[in-house]
Each structure stands twice: as structure tokens, then as C-alpha cells.
């Protein structure tokens, strides 16, 4: 392997280390915003100078595998599914990033004058595409390292988080352009020809103008963010919420019952504090996903009082709280042996009038596609030992929480990692949700960074829709995120506790451009890239015709002479 290729590999490896360090990790639990703005510069530089498409694909695959392994190492703790979660994700990222490397390398050679902007567009479009569909995994996005710089991220209510990915990638691509001009390995250090190439490149690149334009764009973004935060989002009603964090991994043998008992004990403590502090019970108690492990038949009038399991072990459990409870539970599908992974709203007299079924399952863990086809079902069940655990929900459901004054609050309840999916939370807000309540169980991860990564990704849902997001988790991060993205944290990570707080909402919730239009920004980038390709192809055709005309005229002139 040539010295130049080794240098390019070293550059890509540098980004492989910097990107996971920029994301929330065990060293920087909130992430490192500074690294997030520039961590991809070395990868982009290497792809610009790649001697071939094949080598660009190799650089991309290396980046995909290394960053996935380093930033999502907590997937190794996903019990017996670790081989599929971590191993499968790494393989998928290798393939996707190999294609990313090819596209960035290809566009870099066809749009030298616009290369920083084009590279940022390709990367933002890649992040959007990897976050779509059944296998979507919207973790480790470039927008997540900067989540704590609130004035900088407010504009996602216009573009969604993809606009922020574009802007962060633009910083890296602009720095890569500077490296490329200053230290280009392929130009050499001397010779009249190389000096001429540098002069031509400098005129086309015009780095000073690009840097000024990016700084101006950043200034506009900060001004917009500061204005939105200063104006705020006044509320016209509120509800008192008690969020429980029991810190018990219900997947471990014999811990499900302990988790339920711990949640009940913490709830009683929180109810007493609510009476002392506010003079009343909270409007809602929220338990995490998997807080109830035994299935609930919501078709029964009193599913807990009439069920032998709950009646024997936990008589009048929720009635004793004296207020509404929201919790995760398997819900029995009538006349079948299947279940939903659901969020159920339990009234103070123990009824379950409403529930929401999870729409985006963990792929190949909670649900396997095409299992109704016998050969596919036999392969997964017999050869791989996998089976469908849950039936997938098909639509958002707004749960109505009654308040003491007779009004209600519409709750959207994303389950598990559904709060990292923009389209799911946006659909809930469009369905009438005035607050989002995420119930999740990340206790299996065993790592602080898994919990803070999840929170950093979910934070953008509150800003995109200007809707408060409550997170009631098994192990953390239990918190309330307001419409500006500010976080009110609850108990420490992996410690039992609760968060009691009043949550302001608006009945006429602010409608953002993102809520109305959705993920339009990546499609704008896609159209722009297609137009660039077409213009380049058309320009090349025109240049060839001009050359042919000039050559033809010279030939004719020669014949006449």
C-alpha cells in the first residue's frame, strides 16, 4: 500500500475516534460540541483525495464499522440479542458508509467550487435515510453532540434535526477544504504545473467567501435561537406529574416482581410529597416501559381486579394511588395469542379506557417482518430461535388525561426508542398531543452513555414540535424537556427515585413549520444534488459540442488554406 493511501487511512481513523468522542460517551456524558463541529473534517479530506471509488468505499466502511462499535458499544448488553443488535448494526453501517464514501468522493470531483456545501448535503441526506424505515437507527447523528447549545439548535422547529446535521457537517467540510488546499498530498510541493493547479483551485474554491457565508449563517441561527428562547412559549394550563424511576432490570430473572414493588413504594413516597408540597395528589403517575410484565386484558371492565394474577399479588394496586396512572404493559389482543407493547392509561378506579400500541418495534427482537409467510417463519423460529414477540401498532393514539378543573390534556406516549423518531412524535402532535410522555427501559444497557445518548436524541422532539417531553425511565434519564429543549433532570442515573413537577402546556399548541411540513429539508437537499448532477452532465455535453465546433472550423479553415 502506498504512503498516500496510508495517510488517507490515518485521516479516516482520526475521524473514527473523534466522532464517538463528540457524541455523549463515558468520558463526556453530554457529548463534546466542539468536536461535533469538526470531527468529520479528516474523513472528508481523505475522501476528497481518495485515488479511486473503491478506496473511498473502503474508507467509508472503516468509518462506519469503527464509529458504530465505539459509540454504540452498550448494544453488547442487549441480552441474548447482542449478536444481532451490535453485530448486525455494525455490518449495516459498514455497507451504508461505504456508499456514503463513494458518493462524497464522486461529488467532490464534480463540484469543486461548491464542494463544502455539497458534502454537507450528502452527509445530511445519508443521516436522514439511515433514520427511515423498519431498520432505522437514528442514534449517533451529527446533530446530537451539540444538543446542549440551546440557542444554536432552536431552528430545528423549521428544518427538523436534518438542518442541524447539515450545518454541523458544513463546518467539517469547510475545514476539510482548507486542509485539502494547504496539505494536498496529490499536488506535491514543487513544479510549475503544481503551482498552476494551486492557483486555479484557489480561484474556484474561494475559501474566504465560503467561510464568511457559513459564519453569517451561524450568526442568523444563533439570533433566531436567542429570540425564540427569549420570547418563550407561555402556557394556559398545566398538570402535576410524578415520574417514577425504579432502577430494576425486569429482564433479569426474578426481578420483575421486585421492580413492580419498588415502583409502588416510590409512588407512595411521591404521593405523600405531592400532598405536602402542592396540597393535592398529582394528576398523573408515570411508570416506565416493562414496569408491568404480566399481560393486561384491557377488554375487561377492571383488568386488574378481575385478573387472578394481579388480584392475588397486588390487590387494588392502582386504586390505592387515588389518581391516574400511565405505565408500560403487554396488552392482550382479543381472540388471539398475541400482544401489543403498549402504554396504558389506568383510571383511579382501576379501569383502562385507553391505550397506545408501539408503532416502531426493535427490529428482529420485538417484531420480524413477513412472519406470516411459513418458510420465513420456519427459518427464524427453527434456525435462529427468533419469534415475533409483539404485534405492531398502526397509528398514534392521543390519551386524554383528566384534570381537576374539568379540562383534559392530550398525551402522546412514544414507547422505548420511539422518542428518537421525528415522524412518530410529529404524528402524535398532529393527532392532538399537547405533551409527549416517553416510557422506556434502558436499564439493560448498563452504561451511562446509553442513557444520555437516548436523551440527547429525544431532546429534539420537544424543540421540533414545541411540545414538552416527559421521560419516565427505568434507570434514567428521567426528566422533563420543555419546548426550548431545556432539561429538568430527575434522579441520578441507575439510582431509584422519582421526579415530581408541574408541567405547563398549551391547549392551542404552537404549530411549527416542521410539524406542518415534516421532513421536507432532506428532499430539498436531494433535489439540489440531482440538479447539480444534471447541470454538470449538461455542461459537459455543451463543452464537448463547443470543442467539436471549434475543431471543425479549424479543419475547414485549414482545408481552404
Image (cartoon, rainbow, N blue to C red):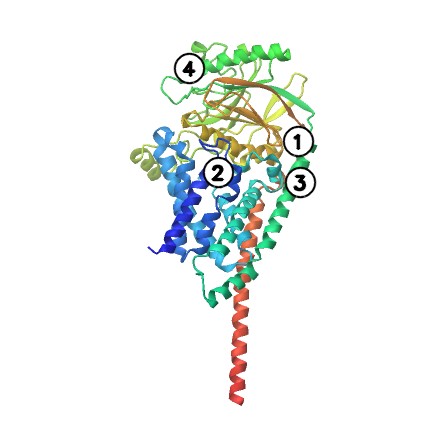
Judge whether residue 337 can be spotted in this image.
Answer: no
Q: Can you tell which quarter of the image residue 231 is in?
A: top right
Q: In screen coordinates, is 164 left or right of 11? A: right
x and y, in percent, of residue 346 in the image: 54, 18
The disc, 1 or 3, on the residue closer to the chain's N-terminal end is: 3
User: Quick one: SS at disc 1?
Assistant: loop
Image mark for residue 223? 3
Which of the pair 300/510 is nearer the observer? 510
Residue that mark 1 sits on: 509
Foreground tag (1 vs 2) = 2
Is the Cβ of the residue at disc 1 closer than 8 Å to that at disc 3?
Answer: no
x and y, in percent, of residue 484 in the image: 62, 32
Which of the pair 324/43 is nearer the observer? 43
Foreground tag (4 vs 3) = 3
Residue that mark 2 sits on: 22
Residue that mark 4 sits on: 258
Foreground tag (1 vs 3) = 3
The disc, 3 or 2, on the residue closer to the chain's N-terminal end is: 2
Relative to 287, say whether 21 is above or below: below
Q: Distance of mark 1 from mark 3, alpha carbons?
A: 23 Å
User: Quick one: SS at disc 4?
Assistant: helix
User: Quick one: SS at disc 2?
Assistant: helix
Q: Distance of mark 4 from mark 2, alpha carbons?
A: 37 Å
Q: Quadrant of the N terminus?
A: bottom left
Foreground tag (4 vs 2) = 2
x and y, in percent, of residue 269 in the image: 53, 11
The disc, 1 or 2, on the residue closer to the chain's N-terminal end is: 2
Amino acid at each position: 500500500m502506498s504512503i498516500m493511501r496510508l495517510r488517507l487511512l490515518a485521516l479516516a481513523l482520526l475521524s473514527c475516534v473523534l466522532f464517538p468522542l463528540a457524541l455523549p460517551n463515558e468520558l463526556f456524558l453530554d457529548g463534546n460540541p466542539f468536536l461535533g463541529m469538526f470531527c468529520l473534517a479528516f474523513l472528508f479530506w481523505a475522501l476528497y483525495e481518495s485515488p479511486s471509488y473503491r478506496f473511498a468505499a473502503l474508507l467509508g466502511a472503516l468509518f462506519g464499522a469503527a464509529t458504530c462499535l465505539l459509540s454504540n458499544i452498550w448494544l453488547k448488553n442487549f441480552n441474548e440479542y447482542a449478536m444481532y443488535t451490535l453485530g448486525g448494526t455494525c455490518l449495516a453501517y459498514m455497507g451504508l458508509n461505504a456508499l456514503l464514501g463513494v458518493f462524497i468522493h464522486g461529488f467532490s470531483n464534480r463540484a469543486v467550487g461548491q464542494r463544502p456545501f455539497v458534502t454537507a448535503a450528502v452527509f445530511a441526506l445519508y443521516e436522514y435515510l439511515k433514520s427511515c424505515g423498519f431498520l432505522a437507527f437514528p442514534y449517533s447523528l451529527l446533530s446530537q453532540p451539540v444538543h446542549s447549545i440551546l440557542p444554536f439548535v432552536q431552528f430545528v422547529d423549521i428544518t427538523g434535526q436534518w438542518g442541524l446535521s447539515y450545518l454541523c457537517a458544513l463546518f467539517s467540510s469547510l475545514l476539510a477544504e482548507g486542509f485539502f488546499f494547504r496539505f494536498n498530498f496529490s499536488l506535491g510541493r514543487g513544479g510549475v504545473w503544481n503551482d498552476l493547479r494551486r492557483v486555479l483551485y484557489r480561484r474556484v474554491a474561494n475559501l474566504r467567501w465560503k467561510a464568511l457565508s457559513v459564519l453569517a449563517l451561524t450568526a442568523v441561527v444563533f439570533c433566531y435561537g436567542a429570540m425564540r428562547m427569549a420570547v418563550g412559549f407561555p402556557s394556559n394550563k398545566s398538570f402535576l406529574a410524578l415520574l417514577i424511576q425504579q432502577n430494576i432490570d425486569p429482564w433479569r430473572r426474578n426481578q420483575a416482581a421486585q421492580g413492580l414493588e419498588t415502583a409502588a413504594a416510590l409512588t407512595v413516597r411521591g404521593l405523600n410529597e405531592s400532598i405536602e408540597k402542592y396540597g393535592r395528589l398529582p394528576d398523573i403517575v408515570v411508570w416506565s416501559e416493562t414496569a408491568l410484565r404480566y399481560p393486561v386484558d384491557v377488554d375487561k371492565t377492571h383488568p386488574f381486579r378481575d385478573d387472578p394474577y394481579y388480584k392475588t399479588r397486588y390487590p387494588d394496586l392502582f386504586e390505592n394511588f387515588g389518581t391516574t396512572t400511565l405505565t408500560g404493559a403487554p396488552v392482550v389482543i382479543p381472540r388471539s395469542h398475541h400482544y401489543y407493547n403498549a402504554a396504558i392509561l389506568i383510571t383511579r378506579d382501576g379501569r383502562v379506557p385507553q391505550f397506545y400500541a408501539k408503532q416502531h418495534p426493535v427490529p428482529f427482537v420485538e417484531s420480524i417482518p413477513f412472519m406470516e409467510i411459513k418458510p420465513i417463519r420456519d427459518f427464524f423460529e427453527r434456525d435462529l430461535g427468533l419469534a415475533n414477540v409483539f404485534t405492531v401498532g398502526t397509528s398514534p393514539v392521543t390519551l386524554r388525561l383528566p384534570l381537576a378543573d374539568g379540562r383534559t390534556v392530550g398525551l402522546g406516549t412514544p414507547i422505548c426508542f420511539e422518542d428518537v423518531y421525528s415522524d412518530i412524535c410529529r404524528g402524535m402532535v398532529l393527532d392532538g398531543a399537547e405533551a409527549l410522555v416517553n416510557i422506556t427501559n434502558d436499564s439493560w444497557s448498563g452504561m451511562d452513555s446509553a442513557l444520555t445518548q437516548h436523551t440527547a436524541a429525544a431532546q429534539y422532539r420537544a424543540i421540533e414540535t414545541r411540545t414538552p417531553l416527559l421521560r419516565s425511565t427505568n434507570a434514567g434519564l428521567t426528566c422533563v424537556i420543555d419546548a426550548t429543549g431545556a432539561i429538568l433532570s430527575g434522579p441520578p442515573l441507575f439510582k431509584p427515585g422519582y421526579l415530581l413537577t408541574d408541567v405547563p402546556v398549551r391547549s392551542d399548541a404552537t404549530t411549527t413549520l416542521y410539524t406542518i411540513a415534516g421532513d421536507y429539508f432532506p428532499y430539498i437537499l436531494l433535489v439540489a444534488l440531482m440538479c447539480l448532477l444534471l447541470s454538470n452532465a449538461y455542461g459537459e455535453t455543451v463543452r464537448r459540442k463547443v470543442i467539436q465546433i471549434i475543431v471543425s472550423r479549424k479543419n475547414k479553415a485549414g482545408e481552404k488554406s
